[in-house]
Image (tube, helix red, strand yellow):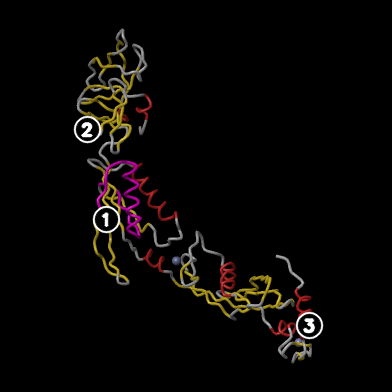
């Protein structure tokens, strides 16, 4: 914006119709009111209170603005907070044009800061200046969110469990990542936080301040790992006429995870993926297979594979003889393409109740 020479315009208007003198300076006016110059002289462009009180949370640094508690990643320094509060409390005269305002902290002692406000504006074409001091008092208390946190408040509980086994460390770490991610993602929603987490027999419990965040964790986990969740609500009270429910989300992750060796209707399968569909590698042929409605039985884990000596490889390469690492007997097994060995070399195999099966070299090293 650039300043326009409005003074000239006013002077032209005045001389055209002026007849009655201004009571202050005697300049000609239309009806004996204050002339524009005297009006500007009498006008304070700024309206600011002498004192501003800011309610600040002593724990998190959040402060009350427009009746609500603000959200910050980190507490604002007191100086910035005081300047922000004064800016919020500032008003300008309706006729102030092209205002420029500077706000800065002059001094402070403990919880009181002296803030200086300087303003320059144009009123009816005349430049006016204003300079004011505002005392900002920081009033410390505990915000409702911090009160809830320290009170151990929660409304959603996520129970991470698995069918027929304990959840793996990876699965529990992932559940915690989701919990803290959801709590931290949108700090505009200050009411979402992780109240506590607890490793319990059979898995992990995560306490969330809201039930919707609990549901998000349950949903994310079952989308990533398969399995399912159930929810059950308990009425815990009432607030502002609304019933308050605490909801438990019981997540059951699938029994089999990647790296498991299972038997699916006679197929020895190394599990690579398991949600709605069970996917894996047939350990006899090396073929990738999927089963949508399988009831697999556990045979072992690829991580438990042991190296064993290859006694011989058949001429057409389809079969090989190896030592069973458990019985030390020589057994003839199918050789899938992922096993590339010659007689006398070592292969990684798992010995199971359904026989001895080779595993791909990378799988035998996983999780070991
Ligand atoms: Zn005047
Ligand atoms: Zn707080």
Residue 152 position within the rendered picture, expressed as x and y whole percent measured from the top left: 34, 63
Residue 169 position within the rendered picture, expressed as x and y whole percent measured from the top left: 34, 42
Check disc 3 and report the residue beneath it: 16
Check disc 1 and report the residue beneath it: 248
Q: Quadrant of residue 96?
A: bottom right
The residue stretch that appears in magenta:
202-230
Q: Nearer the viewer, residue 237 or 93?
A: 93
Q: Nearer the viewer, residue 7 or 154?
A: 7
Check disc 2 and report the residue beneath it: 296
Q: Is residue 334 left or right of residue 148?
A: left
Location of the N terminus (image quadrant): bottom right
Question: Image height check: is 24 above or below 148?
Answer: below
Among the two numbered marks 3 and 2 on one chain, the one whose residue lies closer to the N terminus: 3
- How dense is the environment of label 1, judged by Cα within 10 Å: few (below 14), some, or many (20 and up)? many
Residue 327 is covered by the magenta coloring: no
Numbered label tally: 3
Question: Image height check: is 295 above or below 326?
Answer: below
Q: Which of the four quarters of the rendered structure image does ligand 1 lie in?
A: bottom right
- Residue at the spot x=32%, y=30% of the render? 303
- How dense is the environment of label 3, judged by Cα within 10 Å: few (below 14), some, or many (20 and up)? few
- Residue at the spot x=51%, y=60% of the render? 74
Among the two numbered marks 2 and 1 on one chain, the one whose residue lies closer to the N terminus: 1
Q: Is residue 213 left or right of residue 121?
A: left
Residue 57 position within the rendered picture, expressed as x and y whole percent measured from the top left: 47, 69
């Amino acid at each position: 914006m650039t300043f326009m020479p409005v003074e000239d315009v006013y002077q032209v208007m005045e001389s055209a119709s002026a007849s009655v003198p201004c009571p202050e300076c005697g300049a000609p006016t239309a009806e004996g009111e204050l002339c524009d110059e005297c009006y500007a002289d009498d006008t304070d462009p700024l309206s600011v209170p002498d004192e501003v009180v800011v309610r600040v949370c002593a724990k998190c640094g959040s402060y009350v603005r427009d009746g609500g508690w603000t959200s910050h990643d980190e507490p604002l320094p007191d100086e910035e907070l005081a300047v922000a509060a004064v800016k919020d409390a500032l008003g300008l005269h309706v006729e102030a044009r092209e205002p420029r305002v500077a706000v800065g902290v002059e001094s402070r002692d403990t919880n009181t800061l002296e803030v200086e406000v300087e303003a320059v504006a144009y009123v009816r074409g005349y430049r006016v200046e204003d300079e004011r001091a505002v005392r900002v008092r920081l009033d410390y208390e505990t915000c409702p969110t911090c009160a809830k946190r320290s009170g151990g408040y929660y409304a959603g509980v996520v129970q991470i469990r698995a069918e027929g086994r304990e959840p793996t460390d990876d699965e529990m770490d992932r559940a915690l990542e989701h919990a803290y991610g959801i709590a931290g993602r949108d700090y505009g929603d200050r009411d979402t936080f992780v109240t506590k987490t607890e490793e319990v027999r059979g898995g992990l419990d995560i306490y969330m301040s809201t039930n919707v965040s609990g549901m998000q964790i349950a949903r994310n986990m079952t989308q990533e790992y398969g399995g399912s969740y159930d929810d059950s609500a308990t009425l815990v009270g009432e607030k502002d006429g609304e019933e308050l429910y605490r909801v438990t989300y019981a997540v059951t992750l699938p029994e089999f995870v990647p790296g498991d060796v299972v038997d699916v209707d006679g197929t020895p399968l190394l599990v690579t993926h398991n949600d709605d569909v069970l996917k894996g590698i047939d350990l006899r042929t090396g073929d990738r297979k999927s089963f949508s409605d399988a009831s697999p039985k556990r045979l072992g884990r690829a991580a438990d594979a042991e190296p064993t000596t290859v006694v011989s490889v058949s001429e057409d390469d389809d079969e090989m003889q190896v030592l069973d690492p458990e019985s030390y007997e020589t057994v003839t097994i199918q050789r899938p393409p992922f096993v590339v060995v010659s007689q006398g070399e070592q292969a990684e195999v798992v010995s199971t109740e359904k026989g001895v099966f080779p595993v791909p070299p990378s799988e035998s090293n996983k999780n070991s």
